[in-house]
């Protein structure tokens, strides 16, 4: 995937601030951090959506997210952190190579101030619940 900026970083064609890598996973600093230490964890193989990753890869990404999240939290002195994976343009994904954001959070930092929660109308929760379960 030559046109994928993250594949190009993985191949060494574009420089990055590399935090961690192994055979399957790379973690780098996000070039446009929401807070200092904002990190991206990605598989070295190109998949667009998280649910396209085979089990062998998704488990390795998850383990790397846990490991790197602890390092980011401890190093940045953050009060907390968000782990975020945007899947698809509608969800805000700008780079079509699956990646997890680890965003250090500080009390009152104003990042993600708004969480536009909705409410289920009567019967809606049961309906979507059954649809999701049928797809498992
Ligand atoms: P997303 O909207 O989830 O696809 O996020 C893409 C992220 O990639 C953004 O937060 C960008 O700041 C980050 N990004 C884009 N190009 C680079 C790059 N060359 N090195 C590091 N991070 C990048
Ligand atoms: Zn890619």
Image (cartoon, rainbow, N blue to C red):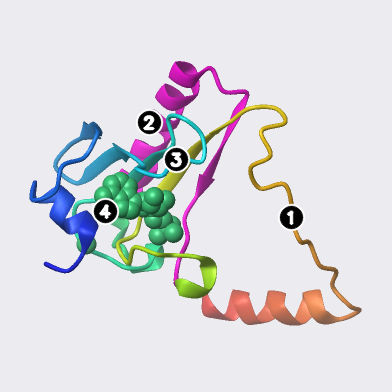
Vertical arrangement, residue 12 with respect to residue 35, above or below: below
Residue labelled 4 has its Cβ within 8 Å of some atom of ligand 2: no
Decide if ligand 1 comes within 8 Å of the CB at mark 3.
yes
Residue 82 part of the magenta segment:
yes
Residue 1 within the segment the image draws in magenta: no
Q: How crowded is mark 3: few (under 14 residues within 10 Å), some or many (20 or more)?
A: some
**Among numbered discs 3 and 1, the one appearing first in the sequence:** 3
| Residue 68, horizontal then vertical, whole percent | 38, 31
Mark earlier in primary sequence (4, 3): 3
Q: Name the residue under label 1.
A: 115
Q: Which residue is drawn at 89% across and 78% down?
A: 121
**Dot 4, how many residues are within 10 Å of its Cα: few (below 14), some (14-19), or many (20+)?**
few
Q: Along the horizontal axis of the image, is 105 left or right of 39?
A: right
Can residue 42 be seen by looking at this rendering? Answer: no
Q: Give how far apart the Cα atoms at labels 4 and 3 are.
A: 29 Å
Front: mark 2 or 3:
3
| Disc 1 residue lies near ligand 1 with CB under 8 A | no
**Which is closer to the viewer, label 3 or label 1?**
3
Q: Name the residue under label 2.
A: 68
Measure the C-alpha gap from mark 2 to mark 3.
16 Å
Q: Mark 3 points at which residue?
A: 33
* Above-or-below relation of 58 to 87: above
Residue found 40% across the figure and 23% down from its top: 71
| Residues at marks 4 and 2, CA–CA distance in whole angstroms | 19 Å
């Amino acid at each position: 995937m030559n046109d994928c900026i993250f594949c190009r970083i993985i191949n060494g064609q574009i420089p990055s601030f590399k935090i961690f890598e192994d055979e399957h996973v790379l973690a780098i600093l996000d070039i446009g951090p929401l807070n200092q230490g904002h990190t991206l964890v990605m598989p070295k193989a190109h998949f667009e959506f998280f649910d396209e990753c085979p089990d062998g890869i998704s488990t390795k990404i998850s383990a790397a997210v846990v490991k790197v999240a602890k390092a980011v939290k401890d190093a940045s002195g953050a009060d907390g952190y968000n782990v975020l994976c945007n899947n698809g343009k509608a969800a805000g994904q700008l780079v079509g190579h699956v990646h997890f954001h680890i965003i250090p959070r500080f009390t009152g930092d104003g990042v993600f101030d708004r969480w536009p929660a909705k409410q289920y109308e009567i019967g809606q929760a049961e309906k979507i619940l059954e649809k999701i379960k049928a797809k498992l």
